[in-house]
Image (tube, rainbow, N blue to C red):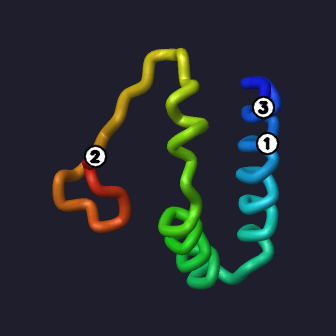
Amino acid sequence: MHVLERRVEAEDLVSRAFRAALELPLLSRCLAGLAWLRDVDLRDIVTKITCPVLLLHGENDPLIPLT
């Protein structure tokens, strides 16, 4: 798959998830966001980032471990 196609696919995935979450009550939005963080694996796409990135991360983060 071409890099641009992956980017469009990732943007579409995020856009659809965001639009769906906006239709939920606040607590449901929070839970949906946490479930999305738990279930969506964007490692293949993240490796394609070419601009500088500031990554702030807690070493005890249970959702996104450092490894």
> Distance between the Cα atoms at labels 2 and 3?
30 Å
Dot 1 falls on a residue whose secondary structure is helix
In which image quadrant can residue 17 be found? bottom right
Give the numbered dot on residue 57.
2
The nearer-to-camera label among 2 and 3 is 3
State yes or no: discs 3 and 1 in contact (Cβ < 8 Å): yes
Q: Residue at x 51, y 30 (%)?
A: 47
Q: Could you tell me which residue is drawn at 37 percent across and 28 percent down?
A: 54
Q: Which residue is mark 3?
A: 1
Dot 2 and dot 3 residues touching (CB under 8 Å): no
Relative height, residue 2 to residue 6 (above, below): above
Which dot, 1 or 2, sits closer to the camera?
A: 1
Of residues 19 and 3, the one nearer the viewer is: 3
Give the amino acid at mark 1: Glu
| Label located before the other in sequence (2 or 3) | 3
Task: Look at the picture and state if 9 lies above or below 47.
Answer: below
Image spot of residue 37 (x, y percent): 51, 63
Question: Is 37 placed left or right of 28 in the picture?
Answer: left
Amino acid found under the numbered disc labelled 2: His
N-terminal of the two: label 3 or label 1?
3
Query: How far from the left and from the top, in percent, is residue 15?
Result: 78, 51
Residue at horizontal 17 percent and vertical 52 percent from the top: 59
The mark lying in front, picked from 3 and 1, is: 3
Q: Secondary structure at mark 3?
A: loop
- First in sequence: mark 1 or mark 2? 1
The quadrant of the rendering that contains the N terminus is: top right
Residue 20: % across, % down: 79, 69
Extreme residue in the top direction:
51
Q: Quadrant of residue 64?
A: bottom left
On the image, numbered disc 1 is attached to which residue?
Answer: 9
**Horizontal side, residue 19 vs residue 10: left or right:** right
Q: Which mark is residue 35?
A: none
